Amino acid sequence: MPRSGRRLPATRPVALAALPAALLAVICAGPAPGATAPGTGSPSRADVRPLTRAHAPTGAPRAATFDTAPARAALQRLLPRHAGQFTLVPDPAAGADTFTVSGTAGAVTVRGSTGATLLTGVGWYLQHVAGADIGWPGDSIGMLPARLPAVPAPVTRSAQVPHRYALNDTDDGYSGPYRTFEEHQRQIDLLALHGINEVFVQVGAEYPYYRALQRFGYSAEELRQWIPGPGHQSWWLLQNLSGFGGPVTERLMRERAELGGRIAEQLRGLGMTPVLPGYFGTVPAGFAARNAGAATVAQGDWAGFDRPDWLDPASPVFAKLAAAYYAEQRAVFGDSSMYRMSPLHEGGRTGSVDVGAAAGAIQGALHAAHPGALWAVLGWQDDPTAELLAGVDTSKLLILDGLSDRYNRLDREARWGGVPYAMGTIYNFGGHTTIGANTSVWLERFGPWRAKSNSALAGIAYLPEATGTNPAAFDLFTDLAWDAGPIDQRTWFAGFAARRYGRPDAEAAAAWEELRKGPYSTSSGLWSESQDSLFSARPSLSAVGAAYWSPKSMRYPAGSVRRALDHLLRVDPALRGSSAYRFDLVDTARQALANHSRVLLPKIRAAYEAKDLTRFRTLTAEWQDGMRLLDQVTGSDPNLLLGTWLSRARSHGADRAEQDRYEYDARSLLSVWGRRGTSEGGFLHDYANREWSGLISELYARRWAAYFATLDEALAGGGAPREIDWHAFEEEWAGRTTRHPDRPAGDPYRLATAVAAALPPAAATG
């Protein structure tokens, strides 16, 4: 049984009087006019019974004060030994998004305008007074003194922008579709600590679709086949695919909906906005045939997948289906003031649909259910288009710019006509474990973009495709929204190095200065993330990257990471006990090895082309030794384990068959991603590559060993190397159910030392 909250048995009755009025109206009305479900009849009592959750109505007046209990509980989770030394004072009159920190030793007072802002004040105190870090991942709170230090003088800070948004549409898939409530709760605590106030809630988003569409001609079984497994649901919600990784069970959907509802409640308790998926027209095949008056547009192909159909929002059935969807969503997730939608994401077809009219109808349906709610749309590729913007009330729109730090010569006011937007960053794609971000670009742009006379910049958007990597990038990007003056990159990284391990250390400072100058100072122009590893690439002597859509070469001098590793190994032994130090040491050692793969592979190629079998065998043995060491060093950190990813997926299955199905959903996302046509034709294989213990040994190392064996045979026998069907190789791995450790093993310091010893000295790496 998954640990995602209490389970409600499918036969438990629900009184109609307990249901929200809007949902009750939908239930009593029955199927939409013209809707039929041949051979299925009406949904059963168990099928139509909704989950319900208490919630405040849309537009409820804000209380004069607020309950600090949720913030106090979060503080207890974050600082269990020191929470009692903080007094949290609600202060709504302070103004939106404002905190004040004051106090004497052992008695720190934080006043704030919301529960989350109180936690942001605590985070400021830890960073600037106590010199400690609670990162994502890793912390140094074990280095805090028993009695917390005094605040020299009261400090008041206000957010520089009203919108501090977090989480990409893909985060639930790439970061962990089978996470527990406790893991989501930890994520919320960290986001609040770092000043975020708007968080996308995707978990359980399939349930309102499942419930509502049963009233428009679809059986429960048809919908369970249409809805993908949790690992692939992010792209279904983006209208890119359907069905893959499923079918899902009603039990799983109910549990995920309950989990999503708990996440939304957790956010509301802290005064944060749960950003819920809105409805913009995604329907299964055959919708128009089952619903009189409906008009749909086939959406064609996305990376080899058939996209779901798009119901024309201007058609009369759309408003009815949207109302049913929002009613079902409200019953489980409650209301919100912000909803996330990106029609025609990465392509799609408009057919004869008037995009402006469609956008107006989408916003109209949203406002019918949630008057005045904000529509958040992703700024990505050509979206949002001028046609879409022309059809909506743009004062109720926020563009989450995913390209702010990727390209040059950007003028967002000119591009979007003055529509409010949030400066965003996507420095991680697919969950890659690579270190780095365009942090210098953030610092160069955020202040000047805000200061423009016609600036429409209204927020920040933290949008890595997967969270839980690059803690320095998370800290710095979220600091942008709370620092009134320009941030000096070198000074900031020096301060980060001091608090990251609990106190200043010359070697730690030197390590982070190397990382600052290298992977954290990459430039804009084409990429917003660093290169991935060739160890995780599909084998080829000419491989230049693992993911097709990622950088093809080093984006910084490799010597910076190699030197950082040497410095980290010389950090004061008294500072080596924190989870922050251990993660950074392992992650830097991992990155140094990954960078070396780009030096070693050309040497292997040269030996092969020279037909030097002896040197070829020496170099390929070095490569395979490096992969074994890589698997061992990543296995010493809890954040880099395949076993955790797989065991969480299996925990959601009620029987062996369901467990195997969800494990395939989780494994396939990391490897083949989809079926053969999407993996090969859509170039999605290895898109979500990451250097995790277990994944390295069972897939990547085996793949390279098989490849090198064919080259060895060719050199020894004088023939051509055997062809390998890599998709079949990877699909076989995705279908496995082998177990892997979900607890770290080995001494991180000893293993990182072994990595340093196995690599050329820093002077030789550039």
Image (tube, rainbow, N blue to C red):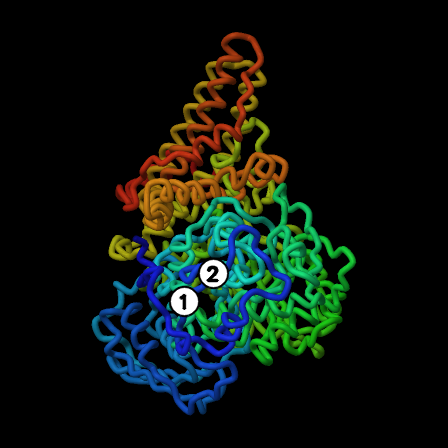
Instruction: Say which label, 1 or 2, has the lower sequence index.
Output: 1
What residue is shown at x 46% (from left), y 18% (from top)? 709
**What kind of residue is marked 1?**
Leu
Q: Which residue is mark 2?
A: 207
User: What numbered label is drawn on residue 51?
Assistant: 1
Residue 323 image offset from top left, x and y in percent: 58, 71
Is 491 or 432 nearer to us in this picture? 432
What residue is shown at x 38% (from left), y 75% (from top)? 119
Residue 403 image offset from top left, x and y in percent: 63, 59
Helix, strand or loop status at disc 2 = helix
Mark 2 residue crowding within 10 angstroms, few (<14) / some (14–19) / many (20+): many
- Could you tell me if residue 480 is visible in this image? no
Q: Is residue 452 above or below residue 291?
A: below
Tell me the quarter of the picture where residue 33 sits.
bottom right
**What kind of residue is marked 2?**
Tyr
Q: Is residue 706 left or right of residue 138?
A: right
Tell me the quarter of the picture where residue 605 sits.
top right
Residue 464 image offset from top left, x and y in percent: 52, 57
Q: Are marks 1 and 2 in contact (CB under 8 Å)?
A: yes
What residue is shown at x 50% (from left), y 18% (from top)? 710
Mark 1 residue crowding within 10 angstroms, few (<14) / some (14–19) / many (20+): many
What residue is shown at x 64% (from left), y 70% (from top)? 319
Total tally of numbered discs in the picture? 2
Furthest-top residue in view? 717
